[in-house]
């Protein structure tokens, strides 16, 4: 038996690294849970640049003087069910973490294919990357969900990308605004007879996925305003520009209180709790369903006093917490490390870009597959009203125990070790 296990481990290592060597974002291991598998749709993908008109230029706000404004550019990648028999394509000139190296990624989506119109529009999912990052950092979710009948939009957050990461104040100020703007733009484009998304997008039935700083923005978008202490910190809130995000204010309520808002949120390792960004009252005010996904050894966003604390304090809603034991901050959300990242250096040669996409314990393809499974189940429940997906979330919390007593639905025997899925209902 040990010999068989050793052979299996070697096979898994070779299999996973084959995907990395090809810079593939669509890796699927033989031990992947059921809902990680692609859906029935072939996939199209397009790149679109949108402009949020007359916005505060937060990256260029000085200590005093007038507040500059500009038309804020946001490039997005859009995946959608396509009217095609073709499958497979590339993403070219993608920047790595070193902000210099450009690579080609490969997946299942076909560039600029004709959309597959349905009787009703598809639910929408918006993806928001970390700091720094880009719109393709979580592209495996884009393809996977589009194959299952979603329109997925992933944002390049200006001032937060590898090649333009600038004043941190811009990231803090703009994350929720970008997330809400893209939602409103998708509703507009769905009604535009001249746009390829015409009749494709149900923006009133939308989910938001945010990783790290994207998770920070998602919490604010979901209703948790930030603390006065943060608002008054000049280094990140020059001239008090974060005041409109302050909890309990009319400005924050106006920003996130539109009738057009998200129905469900997934936050991967959301940043900010350990830095004092939210009070208990602010977190308790969230009333959107939430899922948190993180590693127990996350030293960027924290676990016990970070993501887990947020999970416990969002008492105004039903929420899930999926924990990967011993995983760090980069274990779950990013694509597998492109081959070129293995020797690309940044921070004056002190860091290797490879670690931005990897974890020292969890294989990236395995972690991606598990996350794809639970993301599918969660959005199936809350965006598609699919009762069948509930069985994939109604589990014995401890995956180690589940192996022996109550196997997790959709998982092969012995493949839930190191996982925990917890649930807390609204109080």
Image: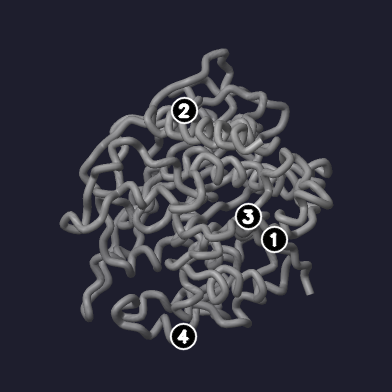
Q: How far apart are marks 1 and 2 (CA)?
A: 29 Å
Q: Using the rendered image of the protein, determine whether residue 199 is visible from the camera's viewpoint.
A: no
**Disc ID at residue 255:** none
In the image, residue 427 lies at what x, y percent? 79, 75
Secondary structure, mark 4, is helix
Looking at the image, residue 174 lies above or below residue 44 = below
Instruction: Say which residue appears at 29% left-offset and 34% top-offset.
Output: 103
Q: Distance between the residues labelled 3 and 2?
A: 28 Å
Q: Nearer the viewer, mark 1 or mark 4?
A: 1
Q: How far apart are marks 2 and 4 (CA)?
A: 44 Å
Q: Distance between the residues labelled 1 and 4?
A: 28 Å
Instruction: Say which residue appears at 49% left-offset and 63% top-offset.
Output: 217
Structural crowding at the residue carrying mark 3, measured as other residues with C-alpha within 10 Å and reported as few (<14), some (14–19) or many (≥20): some
**Mark 4 vs 3: CB contact within 8 A:** no
Q: Which of marks 2 and 4 is in front?
A: 2
**Mark 2 vs 4: CB contact within 8 A:** no
Q: In which quarter of the image is the N terminus?
A: top right
Q: Using the rendered image of the protein, determine whether residue 50 is visible from the camera's viewpoint.
A: yes
Instruction: Say which residue appears at 64% left-offset and 69% top-offset.
Output: 311
In the image, residue 59 lies at what x, y percent? 27, 65
Which residue, given by chain and number where applicable, does mark 3 sit on? 418
**Disc ID at residue 228:** 4
Q: Nearer the viewer, mark 3 or mark 2?
A: 3
Of pointers 1 and 3, the one earlier in the residue sequence: 1
Of pointers 1 and 2, the one earlier in the residue sequence: 2
Q: 260 or 414, which lies in front? A: 414
Which residue, given by chain and number where applicable, does mark 2 sit on? 107
Which residue, given by chain and number where applicable, does mark 1 sit on? 320
Q: 69 or 373, which lies in front? A: 373
Secondary structure, mark 2, is strand
Q: 182 or 42, which lies in front? A: 42
Instruction: Say which residue appears at 25% left-offset and 71% top-offset.
Output: 61
């Amino acid at each position: 038996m040990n010999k068989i296990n050793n052979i299996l481990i070697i096979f898994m290592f070779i299999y996973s690294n084959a995907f990395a060597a090809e810079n593939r974002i669509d890796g699927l291991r033989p031990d992947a849970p059921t809902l990680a598998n692609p859906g029935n749709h072939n996939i199209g993908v397009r790149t679109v640049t949108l402009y949020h008109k007359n916005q505060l230029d937060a990256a260029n706000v000085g200590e005093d003087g007038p507040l500059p404004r500009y038309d804020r550019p946001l490039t997005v990648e859009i995946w959608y069910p396509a009217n095609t028999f073709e499958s497979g394509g590339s993403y070219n000139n993608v920047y790595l973490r070193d902000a210099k190296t450009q690579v080609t990624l490969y997946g299942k989506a076909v560039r600029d294919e004709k959309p597959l119109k349905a009787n009703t529009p598809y639910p929408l999912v918006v993806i928001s990357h970390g700091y720094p990052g880009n719109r393709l950092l979580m592209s495996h979710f884009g393809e996977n969900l589009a194959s299952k009948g979603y329109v997925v939009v992933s944002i390049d957050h200006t001032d937060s990308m590898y090649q333009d990461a600038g004043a941190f104040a811009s990231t803090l100020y703009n994350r929720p605004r970008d997330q809400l703007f893209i939602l409103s733009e998708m509703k507009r484009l769905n009604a535009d007879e001249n746009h390829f998304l015409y009749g494709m997008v149900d923006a009133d039935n939308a989910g938001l996925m945010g990783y790290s700083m994207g998770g920070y923005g998602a919490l604010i978008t979901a209703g948790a305003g930030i603390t006065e202490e943060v608002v008054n910190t000049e280094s990140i809130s020059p001239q008090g520009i974060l005041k409109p995000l302050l909890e309990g204010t009319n400005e924050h309520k106006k920003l996130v209180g539109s009738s057009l808002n998200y129905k469900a949120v997934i936050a991967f390792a959301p940043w900010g709790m350990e830095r004092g960004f939210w009070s208990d009252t602010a977190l308790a005010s969230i009333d959107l369903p939430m899922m948190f996904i993180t590693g127990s050894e996350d030293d960027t966003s924290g676990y016990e006093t970070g993501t887990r604390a947020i999970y416990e304090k969002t008492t105004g809603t039903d929420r899930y917490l999926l924990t990967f034991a011993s995983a760090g901050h980069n274990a779950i959300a990013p694509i597998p490390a492109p081959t070129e990242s293995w020797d690309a250096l940044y921070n004056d040669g002190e860091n290797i870009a490879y670690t931005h996409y990897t974890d020292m314990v969890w294989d990236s393809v395995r972690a991606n597959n598990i996350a794809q499974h639970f993301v599918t189940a969660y959005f199936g429940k809350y965006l598609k009203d699919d009762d069948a997906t509930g069985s994939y979330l109604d589990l014995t919390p401890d995956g180690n125990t589940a192996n022996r007593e109550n196997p997790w639905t959709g998982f092969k025997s012995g493949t839930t070790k190191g996982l925990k899925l917890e649930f807390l209902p609204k109080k």
